[in-house]
C-alpha cells in the first residue's frame, strides 16, 4: 500500500480543522485527532472520508491501518459523501453489506461514531 500525506479538513464541534492525514487508498484517510478535539476520547486515530466525515475511530495506528486495509475494497471511497450515502444508505441499501462494513471495522478494533460521546462503542 502506497501512503501519501495530505492536508485534510475534518469536522469538529469547534469548526473545521486541518490535520495531516495519510491517504491509504484514494478517498480513504488516516489521521490522529488533534489533542484539543474530543479530549476525552480514548480512540485518537480516525479513518475519514476525503469529505471530512468520520468513518471509524480506533485506539492506535496499527488498528487504524488494519481497518483501512479491510475497508479499502468495500466501496469506491473517491465518490462524494452524498453519492456514498445514496449508494449504501439509500432506498435499495444492502443490509448485509452494511453489516459486513461494521464487522470489518470491529474486527480491526474500531467502532463507528465518536467514543467521547458514545462510550459503549468499543472504547
Image (tube, rainbow, N blue to C red):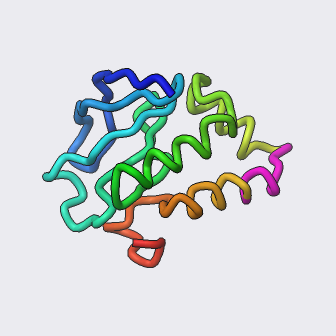
Residue at x-position 61% and y-position 43%: 71
Q: Please give left or right for residue 104 compared with residue 58 in the image.
A: right
114 w.r.t. 49: above or below: below
Near-viewer residue (79 or 58): 58
Q: Is residue 113 magenta?
A: no
11 w.r.t. 5: above or below: below
Q: What residue occupies the far bottom of the structure in this picture?
A: 120
Q: Position of residue 107 (x, y in %)?
A: 59, 62
Residue at x-position 74% and y-position 36%: 87
Q: Please give left or right for residue 30 compared with residue 110 in the image.
A: left
Residue at x-position 61% and y-position 24%: 79
Q: Position of residue 105 (x, y in %)?
A: 57, 56
Near-viewer residue (68 or 87): 68
Q: Position of residue 119 (x, y in %)?
A: 39, 75
**Magenta stretch: dominant SS?**
helix
Q: What residue occupies the far left of the structure in this picture?
A: 36
Q: Position of residue 99 (x, y in %)?
A: 73, 59
Quadrant of the image for the C terminus? Answer: bottom left
Range shown magenta: 92-99
Amino acid at each position: 500500500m502506497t501512503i501519501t500525506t495530505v492536508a485534510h479538513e475534518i469536522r469538529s464541534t469547534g469548526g473545521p480543522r486541518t490535520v495531516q492525514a495519510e491517504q491509504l487508498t484514494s478517498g480513504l484517510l488516516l489521521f490522529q485527532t488533534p489533542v484539543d478535539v474530543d479530549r476525552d476520547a480514548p480512540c485518537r486515530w480516525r479513518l475519514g472520508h476525503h469529505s471530512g466525515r468520520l468513518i471509524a475511530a480506533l485506539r492506535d495506528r496499527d488498528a487504524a491501518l488494519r481497518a483501512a486495509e479491510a475497508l479499502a475494497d468495500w466501496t469506491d471511497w473517491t465518490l462524494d459523501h452524498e453519492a456514498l450515502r445514496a449508494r449504501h444508505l439509500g432506498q435499495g441499501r444492502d443490509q448485509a453489506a452494511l453489516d459486513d462494513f461494521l464487522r470489518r471495522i470491529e474486527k480491526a478494533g474500531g467502532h463507528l461514531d465518536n467514543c467521547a460521546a458514545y462510550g459503549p462503542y468499543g472504547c
